[in-house]
Image (spheres, rainbow, N blue to C red):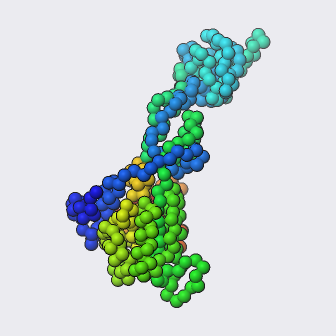
């Protein structure tokens, strides 16, 4: 396994003291790619929501199993369509869940319900509201207007959704609510998924209080643990909450060793900035192979990345907003890879900026924003409140992050910008 120095040397233009977001992401990608996949387990479908599929799920059946009607209407042989209205004698009704018994001849049709199996020899359905019904000699005649249908319309073919013997879900896919329904449609009750990623997390600092502690001058209640817990839980990780660890070498060493023995990933907040008590940084160096970065980004400049034993370590800044931004930019993609998920880039939304934004090239900036749809259908984003890295209120009021990229400069009102939306993340 390559050391962190070896990974860094392989990356052109890598400078840990002035690291671009792109280079930091590339480094982390190389770091996690070398790790073996975690073990898998079999779960009932109802317990597998949000988990990562560990092997291709092969469809044992065709879905749908038979040609069937896409709507309520009348089924007939489409070869009879022509330039004149079609007169068809109604000879029965085909219901969903029951195969039609009997033959339908030329000049005849059956009333058919949505999902009902298409009777043999019939391939076209017309919606009942488009027809005219007439009585003739004690029978019902269905008139099909000319020019509104083609043969085969409104018929769902067997296997057009899923074909027997082909993958329905690929390994690495996330079992979303829609994916659960898809697997259930195959009659599959259990799925093989990767086990939950174990992530240990603790905050550091003598000034950080746990809930229930009495507030004292100069101290703050720990919000980061709860934010990170929410972010990890949303991803389906098994979270090991280790509380707040004071700036004490003995306590820090014990916490890191305990985390490394029980977790796949360790996340800390605080203790990695210049000027802070260096106990946390010193302990990271003592126990593992760790790199300390100054990333050209705002918020979230200081960050530590490395290994402690067999665990991956992420040392995040202490400011609450910086914790969330660095998690979304760096930690979340790495965790998805470690969980067995299919690698993907963060999708950005394009929206017009409501106001001018000041930006100097040379760093990536993440501003809290609120995206709305204007009456003309275009998307507009505006800054959401105070942008200070310790201000949580504006993070709650925002629904996304305006991403101003490394080489980007000032943005004029009306210019389009990239937005990383929070839905499903924050």
Task: Work out whether residue 25 or residue 383 is closer to the camera in this orientation and state it.
Answer: 25
Across and down, in percent, residue 158 comes to 54, 26
Above or below residue 203? Residue 5 is above
Above or below residue 267? Residue 153 is above
On the question of residue 235 being in view, the answer is no
Residue in the image at 50% along x and 33% along y: 59
> Left or right of 24: which side holds 326?
right
Task: Single out the residue that lies furthest toward the bottom.
Answer: 217
Residue in the image at 26% along x and 58% along y: 2
Across and down, in percent, residue 228 comes to 49, 66
Above or below residue 343? Residue 115 is above
Across and down, in percent, residue 334 comes to 39, 58
On the question of residue 184 being in view, the answer is yes
What is the count of numbered marks?
A: 0
Q: Quadrant of residue 338?
A: bottom left
Across and down, in percent, residue 214 comes to 58, 85
In what quadrant of the picture does the N terminus appear? Answer: bottom left
Q: Quadrant of residue 65?
A: top right
Residue in the image at 68% along x and 23% along y: 98
Task: Work out whether residue 293 or residue 299 is closer to the camera in this orientation and state it.
Answer: 293
Task: Work out whether residue 345 or residue 405 is closer to the camera in this orientation and state it.
Answer: 345
> Left or right of 150: which side holds 317?
left
């Amino acid at each position: 396994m390559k050391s962190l120095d070896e990974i860094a040397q392989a990356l052109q233009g890598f400078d840990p003291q002035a690291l671009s977001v792109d280079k930091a992401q590339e480094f982390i990608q190389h770091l996690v790619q070398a790790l073996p996949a975690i073990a898998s387990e079999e779960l009932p479908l109802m317990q597998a929501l949000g988990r990562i599929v560990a092997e291709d799920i092969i469809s044992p059946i065709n879905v749908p199993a038979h040609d069937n009607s896409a709507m309520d209407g009348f089924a007939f042989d489409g070869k009879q369509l022509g330039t004149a209205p079609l007169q068809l004698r109604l000879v029965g009704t085909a219901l969903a869940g029951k195969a039609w018994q009997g033959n339908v001849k030329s000049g005849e049709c059956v009333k058919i319900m949505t999902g009902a199996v298409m009777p043999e020899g019939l391939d076209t359905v017309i919606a009942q509201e488009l027809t005219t019904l007439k009585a003739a000699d004690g029978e019902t005649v269905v008139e099909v207007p000319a020019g509104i249908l083609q043969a085969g319309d409104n018929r769902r073919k067997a296997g057009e959704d899923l074909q027997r013997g082909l993958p329905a879900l690929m390994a690495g896919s996330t079992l979303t609510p829609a994916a659960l329904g898809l697997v259930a449609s195959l009659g599959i009750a259990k799925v093989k998924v990767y086990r939950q990623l174990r992530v240990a997390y603790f905050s550091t600092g003598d000034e950080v209080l746990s809930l229930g502690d009495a507030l004292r001058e100069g101290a703050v209640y720990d919000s980061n643990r709860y934010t990170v817990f929410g972010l990890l839980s949303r991803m389906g990780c098994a979270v090991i909450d280790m509380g707040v660890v004071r700036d004490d070498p003995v306590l820090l060493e014990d916490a890191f060793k305990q985390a490394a023995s029980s977790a796949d990933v360790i996340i800390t907040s605080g203790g990695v900035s210049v000027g802070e008590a260096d106990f946390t940084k010193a302990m990271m160096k003592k126990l593992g192979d760790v790199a300390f970065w100054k990333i050209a980004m705002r918020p979230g400049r200081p960050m530590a990345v490395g290994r402690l034993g067999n665990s991956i370590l992420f040392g995040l800044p202490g400011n609450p907003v910086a914790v969330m931004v660095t998690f979304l930019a760096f930690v979340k993609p790495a965790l998805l890879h470690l969980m067995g998920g299919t690698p993907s880039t963060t999708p950005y939304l394009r929206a017009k900026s409501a106001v001018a934004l000041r930006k100097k090239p040379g760093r990536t900036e993440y501003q809290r924003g609120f995206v709305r749809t204007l009456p003309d259908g275009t998307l507009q984003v505006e800054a959401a409140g105070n942008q200070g890295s310790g201000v949580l209120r504006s993070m709650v009021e925002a629904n996304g992050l305006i991403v101003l990229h490394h080489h980007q400069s000032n943005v004029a009102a009306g210019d389009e910008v990239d937005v990383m939306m929070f839905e499903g993340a924050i």
